[in-house]
Every structure is written in structure tokens, then in C-alpha cells.
Image (cartoon, rainbow, N blue to C red):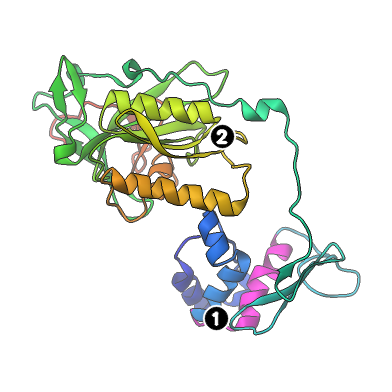
Amino acid sequence: MRNDIDALADAVGRIGPSELSLSTDGMWPRDLLDEGAMDAVVRRTIEAGVDPVDALRMATLNPARHFGLDERGSLAPGNVADVVIVDDLEAMNVTTVLSGGEVVVRNEEIRVAPRSHEYPAFVYDTIDVESGPESFAVPAEAADENGRVRAIEVGEGLLSMATTVEPRVEDGDLHAAPDRNVAKVALLDRHPDGDGTGFTGFLEGYGIDEGAVATSMTMESTGVLAVGTSDEALSTAVEHVADLGGGWAVVRDGEPIAEVPYRIAGAAADLEVEETAQLLNAVENGCRSLGVDVDQPLLTVVSLPFVGVPTFKLTFSGYADVLNRSVVGLTPENGAQ
């Protein structure tokens, strides 16, 4: 869930509540357990100074009207509606929920079992990548005359910028230089019918000192993304994600130290939310144990292909220079810093 409620609350005063809607965007499992979902968004909006009635309208009636759902979004004769009962408008503490005419929560106790889902076999076979160490090799010729290459610099939250770094050179190839906070970063096409395309570049500022982390949870791309300090570590992490059928893997000394499977299309877990949250906590702690020191280690990784936020991102064929709407390679242009 994004931390932009204050900006939204300011817009309510300028635009009016009838023109704005609320949503959760993506939420991590631990946030669902600790805060809730839409109830948390409404609660935060009220805490930011929006009248509770306006906040509720922005979460119900406004989105229904926007999408032309005339019989939804409000309690009225003939409307279709689930009902949420709260004990306090400002605290937004949900006590009872009626869904589809059935009481599913009463006095904060869940009365129904979670829905079960069956998926076709192909949903569990979506990771097909070239993962040998040679897949992450970068020839020394990619550097300029000063030994520098283009790289992504980690920013705050989803932001990342363009920079240049000086990788370590060994046996004719460019390697990570963790002593200078320079890691390798790779994005591989994971589509089973793909041609094994992928791009390996460099990442500055992630803080990783050893090992690697890999995931198939990649914004705006169907890939496997890995950040690591050696080609071997990158290979091990990506191979483990493939073995899981998707998900997260953190490796050190050639062995996985934390993992969480995302077996459904490589993008979703088929575990209970509590277990998924515990495993993701272990993955984040595993990243920390490798030296990663950014505020949000997992979000930083998954957002590297997200060109919806500037300015320098990752694609299967090079870096995305978002503001210039172009894809560029490793070798800097003359004068690039």
C-alpha cells in the first residue's frame, strides 16, 4: 500500500470527495495481517483529516459510479451490496461482514472457510530461463575507456536513477564489486516459449556484500530478476526460483538460506497468508544478512523493471531510460557520468 494518503487528503479539500476514489494498490501479506486491506486505507484517510463519510464514499460509491456499476456502491432498494459493520467510524474497526447474503464475520470472528481454487497444470509450469553462470557474464569490452559502465542507482522507494560504475575486471569479464557497493543485476525472460532473452547490468546502492537474491515477482514483466555479487550466486538463486515454480530465493555460499514459493504462474503463493508472510519475513531477513541496507529490500528489487516510475529501469534487452523513452546498453555515451 502506497504512503500517499496525505497528498490525497489535500486533494479532497481542493477537488472535493465526489471526484476521488480509494484503492489498496498492492499489499504485502504482513500488511494484510497487521493492518487489513480497504479498512486500513479508509482508516488512514480519516486519520489524514478526511471526514469519515467522505472517506467511505471514496471507497464505495465513487468507484462504482466511475465504472458504471449503477446497482452497486450504496445501500439502496434493489442494489447489490455486501455490508460491513464497524463499531466506530474513525477507528474503522470491522465487527461484522455480510457477503452474498451470508454472515461471513460476526463479532470479529470469521465464520466461513477461505475459498479453495483449482488451477490447470500449465499454471504451475511458467519458469523457463537460462540460468547457468555463463548467462550472467558481461565482457570487459562493454566498459568505456575508463572502465565504467552504465548502472542503476537505487533511490527511495520505487525510484531509481542512472549512474555509471566501475566493475571489477577478471578473466576478460566484468564482475560485481561489493566493496564499492556495486552488484550485478539481471532480468531474464521466464516465458516457457521464450527464446531465453535476458540482460545483465549493474546496480549501485543496494548494499549486498555476498550471495544473491532472486524473484519471479517482477513488476510489469514476466521475468526472473536477480541481484548478486557473483555469477555463480546469481545462477544458484535463479535456479532455485525455477525449482520452486516461482517465488523468492536468497542464497549464500551456494546454498539457499530463505525462500518462498509462488507456484501460481510464478506470481502468487498457494499458501495461507500467515505462512506466506512468515516466509517473506525470512526472505527479507535473509537479504539483511547479506548486507542489504535499503529501507525496503524486496520492493526495491521487484520495482526495478517498473517503467511507470522514473528514471532508469531494467528490461530484457537493456536499461530503460524512462524520460528519454529509449532502451540503452552498458557502454556509456561520451561524457556520461
Assign a secondary structure to mark 1.
loop
Please report the residue visible at 70 percent of the width from the left and 73 percent of the height from the top: 108
Assign a secondary structure to mark 2.
loop
Q: Is residue 287 magenta?
A: no
- Residue 175 falls left or right of residue 297: left
- Residue 249 falls left or right of residue 29: left
Please report the residue visible at 76 percent of the width from the left and 59 percent of the height from the top: 68
In the image, residue 262 lies at what x, y percent? 56, 38
Q: Is residue 93 above or below residue 304?
A: below
In the rendered image, which residue does mark 1 sit on? Answer: 50
Of pointers 2 and 1, the one earlier in the residue sequence? 1
Q: Is residue 236 above or below residue 4?
A: above
The quadrant where residue 229 appears: top left
Please report the residue visible at 65 percent of the width from the left and 85 percent of the height from the top: 88
Using a 10 Å C-alpha cutoff, classify the residue at mark 1 as few (fewer than 14 neighbours), some (14 to 19) or many (20 or more): many
Disc tally is 2
Work out which residue is located at the far right of the displayed protein and give it.
Answer: 78
Q: What amino acid does circle 1 point to?
A: Val
Q: What amino acid does circle 2 point to?
A: Gly
Please report the residue visible at 14 percent of the width from the left and 39 percent of the height from the top: 179
Using a 10 Å C-alpha cutoff, classify the residue at mark 2 as few (fewer than 14 neighbours), some (14 to 19) or many (20 or more): many
In 3D space, how far apart are the residues under numbered discs 2 and 1 (Cα atoms)?
Answer: 39 Å
- Residue 107 falls left or right of residue 182: right
On residue 266, which mark appears?
A: 2
Which residues fall within the magenta stretch? 48-66
Quarter of the picture holding the C terminus:
top left
Asked whether residue 187 is in view, the answer is no
- Residue 65 falls left or right of residue 328: right
In the image, residue 284 lies at what x, y percent? 39, 49
